[in-house]
Image (cartoon, grey):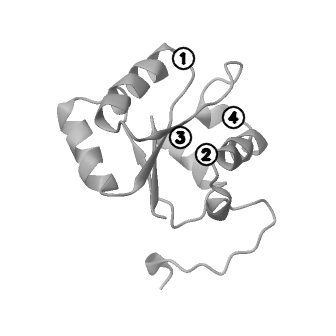
């Protein structure tokens, strides 16, 4: 299954990259997305199953609302209210949320060696 994850910013993306396989695309809204950014995201994710992982604050909730309209079939991942955003959420908790969403095959568990090669590795 092809998946794509949408987050708010580059720091959220960097945090998730630490616990996801390199093959999983992570896209950023870069704040509250306008119509042009939403169209761009739609083109980028294509037919992939979308997972939305935004912060649990007023800005994140607003962005989640806009993305929900654009991606009605998206799955939603949540961080705890006590964490100041996805970028500051402990890796263990991020992994737990990814597991709850059934994404075990896409998780890069700590200490797990990967034999995955990317085009940019050559």
Instruction: List the residue tagged with mark 3.
Output: 11
Dot 1 falls on a residue whose secondary structure is: loop
- Disc 4: CA contacts within 10 A as few (<14), some (14-19) or many (>=20): some
Contact, mark 2 vs mark 4 (Cβ under 8 Å):
yes
Dot 2 falls on a residue whose secondary structure is: helix
Find residue 31 and report its horizontal and vertical position in percent.
37, 28
- Cα separation, mark 4 vs mark 1, equals 13 Å
- Cα separation, mark 2 vs mark 3, equals 6 Å
- Cα separation, mark 4 vs mark 3, equals 11 Å
* Outermost residue, bottom side: 122
Q: What residue lies at 65% left-to-right and 47% top-to-bottom? A: 98
Q: Which mark is residue 57?
A: 1
Identify the mark nearer the N-term, 1 or 3.
3
Front of the two marks 1 and 3: 1
Find residue 95 and report its horizontal and vertical position in percent.
71, 47
- 90 relative position to 60: left or right: right
* Outermost residue, right side: 111
Dot 4 falls on a residue whose secondary structure is: loop
Identify the mark nearer the N-term, 1 or 2.
2
Contact, mark 2 vs mark 3 (Cβ under 8 Å):
yes
Q: Which mark is residue 15?
A: 2
- 105 relative position to 46: left or right: right
Q: Quadrant of residue 112?
A: bottom right
């Amino acid at each position: 299954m092809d998946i794509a994850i949408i987050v708010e910013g580059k720091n959220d993306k960097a945090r998730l990259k630490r616990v996801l396989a390199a093959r999983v695309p992570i896209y950023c809204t870069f704040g509250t997305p306008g119509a042009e950014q939403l169209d761009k995201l739609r083109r980028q994710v294509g037919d992939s199953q979308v997972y939305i992982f935004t912060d649990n604050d007023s800005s994140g909730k607003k962005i989640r609302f806009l993305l929900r309209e654009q991606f009605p079939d998206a799955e939603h991942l949540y961080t705890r209210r006590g964490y100041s955003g996805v970028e500051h959420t402990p890796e263990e908790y991020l992994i737990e949320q990814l597991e709850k969403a059934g994404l075990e095959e896409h998780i890069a568990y700590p200490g797990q060696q990967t034999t995955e090669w990317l085009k940019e590795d050559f």
